[in-house]
Amino acid sequence: MDQALMENYCSVVKDTDIVYFLGDHVMGNRMEGLAKIKSLPGTKIAIRGNHDYDHSIHPQKVRDKWIPIYRDTFDIVIDSWSIIQTWHDRVIKMCHFPTTFQFDGDKKYSAYRPDIDDCDWLLCGHVHNAWKVQPENKTVNVGVDVHNYRPVSQEELLELMRQYE
């Protein structure tokens, strides 16, 4: 699976592209997975997810070990839980977590849920293949699970948003 993900990534991302990783960057062997991410093209920007060992959900001792490794893997690691950008007159917030709970176990992450009053659309990860778009919450899941196991371009996301506006 790793090889297929890397091939799919390389088929759409060039060295000059900027790619936002919205959390849960690797599963399984973290050192191996992060080394693979580091080798991929593009400027890689990370927003932490609950499975990333540099996230504050984890004990400080664990974070102290992993923070430098994540900083070495990604070109930029965002220190806040979300970032906001403007894309073609739309205010876009990016966060690992969506605004709504998916599973009972998700309630422990309520402190990390983004407020969407300050944006037009939220891009998130975390939910894997539970859904692709929640139009009522103006939220798009950018996880590879629902996008043919490849990154999604800004143009594709804007087109998806237009379908629900």
Image (cartoon, rainbow, N blue to C red):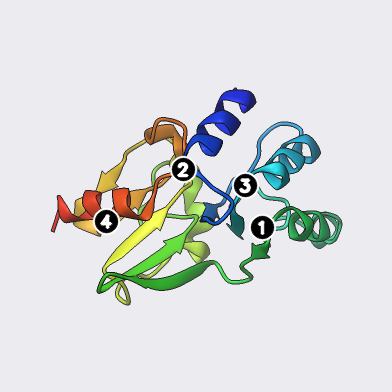
Specify which label sits upstream in the sequence, 4 or 2. 2
* Residue 48 appears anywhere in the view: no
x, y percent for residue 161: 22, 54
Name the element at disc 3: loop
**Where does the C terminus fall, quadrant-wise?**
bottom left
Q: Which mark is residue 165?
A: none
Q: Which mark is residue 57?
A: 1
Q: Amino acid at mark 1?
A: Ile
Closer-to-camera residue (20/108): 20
Report how far apart the C-alphas of labels 1 and 4 lie in the structure: 32 Å
Pair 2/3: label in front: 3
Name the element at disc 2: loop
* Crowd class of label 4 (few under 14; some 14 to 19; many from 20; radius 10 Å): some
In the image, 162: left or right of 119?
Answer: left
**Residue beneath the point at 65% across and 65% down:** 76
**Residue beneath the point at 25% across and 58% down:** 137
Closer-to-camera residue (19/130): 19
Report how far apart the C-alphas of labels 4 and 2 lie in the structure: 14 Å
Specify which label sits upstream in the sequence, 3 or 4. 3
Report the residue marked by disc 4.
158
Report how far apart the C-alphas of labels 1 and 2 lie in the structure: 26 Å
Report the residue marked by disc 2.
151
Pair 1/2: label in front: 2
Name the element at disc 4: helix
Specify which label sits upstream in the sequence, 2 or 3. 3
